Image (spheres, rainbow, N blue to C red):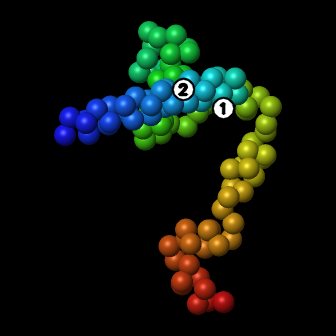
Amino acid sequence: MIRLIGKVFVELTIFMIFFIFWQFVFAYLGRISGQDVDDGDYSNLSVNSIFILNTFRNSVGDLSPPGTKLWNFYIDDSIKKKVWNANTGPQEQEYLNPLHLADSNKA
């Protein structure tokens, strides 16, 4: 039992090293790509700390979309809508329509 607990701590330590490393990598990538994060919960912290905490929250499931203030300056709304809706093809739109069976009977 003691060996099992020791093995768990060793493997947990290895996982946490990689996990923390990737937290910093993704926080840095978000920072250099011009994302904005909501600092409402962390108003007293530096911007870098807010990015790291936001990346951690996203990694454990508390998803928050990044702000796009910098991207809005370069991309107009029509292009953003095309990119945002690119993943919803006709099959997905038919599936997302709750009345798709009623619509197909009319044809």
In-front residue for pair 25/105 = 25
Label 2 element class:
helix
Q: Position of residue 16 (x, y in %)?
A: 43, 29
Disc 2 designates what residue? Answer: 21
Left or right of 24 in this view: 41: left
Left or right of 25 in this view: 38: left
Label 1 element class:
loop
Q: Residue at x 39, y 35 (%)?
A: 11
- CA gap between label 2 and label 1 equals 25 Å
Q: Residue at x 20, y 35 (%)?
A: 2
**Furthest residue to the left?**
1
Q: Position of residue 54 (x, y in %)?
A: 49, 27
Q: Residue at x 32, y 36 (%)?
A: 7
Disc on res. 4: none
The amino acid at mark 2 is Phe
Q: Residue at x 58, y 90 (%)?
A: 105
Q: Quadrant of the N terminus?
A: top left
Left or right of 102 in this view: 70: right
Q: Does the image show residue 69?
A: no
Is 81 above or below relative to 96?
above
Left or right of 20 in this view: 31: right
Q: Position of residue 66 (x, y in %)?
A: 58, 33
In-front residue for pair 1/87 = 1
Is 100 above or below relative to 3?
below
Q: How many marks?
A: 2
Disc 1 designates what residue? Answer: 68
